[in-house]
Image: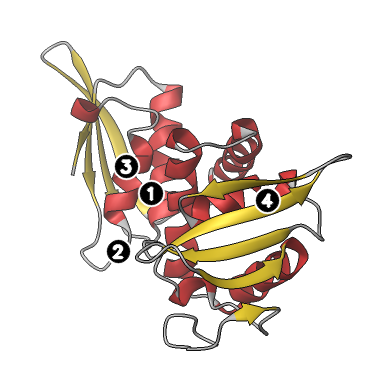
Amino acid sequence: MNLESSSNRGEGEESLSLFALSPSIYLYRVSYRTSKNILTIIYNSIHELILNLSSFKPKDKVTYVLKNDNKDFITITVHKLRFTLSESLLTASSNSLERLYLRLLITNKYASVSDRGRYLFYDHTLRQLLRTIRGGVDGYLSYENRRVIFRMKCRRLSAVFAYATILDWNQSNDIHINFVNVPHEMANTDLMVEALFLHLRRDQIKM
């Protein structure tokens, strides 16, 4: 069921199409139980909610709230949301997965996240794995005008692979500026650059 086109509202709907949702039309209110009370917290995006899901119990409730009229649209349990996320990941395209990954990276930096180190650890682990993949990129260092220049041409159509490769070179070398050439067909390049800015200065990246 695509929530954007459905007129049904209520609790316990069968499914949520994660990658079909527009992140801009909902707020996400989580109701969770403590030893004495039921408290609520509101997240501004699905990405912010995903990054905080580990803080909640399976029976806690997530309510999608329409921003335009502040009305509740649908309520499901945290367990149901986790299941839906897993189901959506299995059917999503590689470009959608990379877009989600990069948005989570950026959200983890700037939004309200209870444990930022959790996703940073996952990111570090994935980048270590991607370092072992050979081919798909040509890169070399040069020294010009007292600056170390890294020039890279990426042939692999993966923004996350390019992101990991650039960071690997910069962490291994004292690079002043990166000249990066990626295929026009590569999706999510804008998000890739924003993710790189989490680690590098803006004047260090030239696309």
Residue picked out by circle 4: 53
> Closer to us: mark 4 or mark 1?
4
- Callout 3: few (<14), some (14-19), or many (20+) C-alpha neighbours within 10 Å? some
Residue picked out by circle 2: 186
Outermost residue to the right: 35
Q: From the image, which quarter does the C terminus lie in?
A: top left
Residue picked out by circle 1: 162
Residue 154 shows in this picture: no
**Amino acid under label 3?**
Glu
Secondary element at tag 2:
loop
Q: Residue 83: percent from the left, percent from the top?
A: 72, 70
Q: Earlier in the sequence, mark 1 or mark 2?
A: 1
**Amino acid under label 1?**
Ala
Q: Earlier in the sequence, mark 1 or mark 3?
A: 1
Between the residue at mark 3 and the residue at mark 2, the CA separation in whole angstroms equals 15 Å
Q: Residue 10: percent from the left, percent from the top?
A: 62, 79
Disc sitting over residue 194 in the figure: 3
> Closer to us: mark 4 or mark 2?
4
Between the residue at mark 1 and the residue at mark 3, the CA separation in whole angstroms equals 13 Å
Secondary element at tag 3:
helix
Q: Residue 138: percent from the left, percent from the top?
A: 32, 47
Q: From the image, which quarter does the N terminus lie in?
A: bottom right
Write the residue at 63% across / 31% down.
117
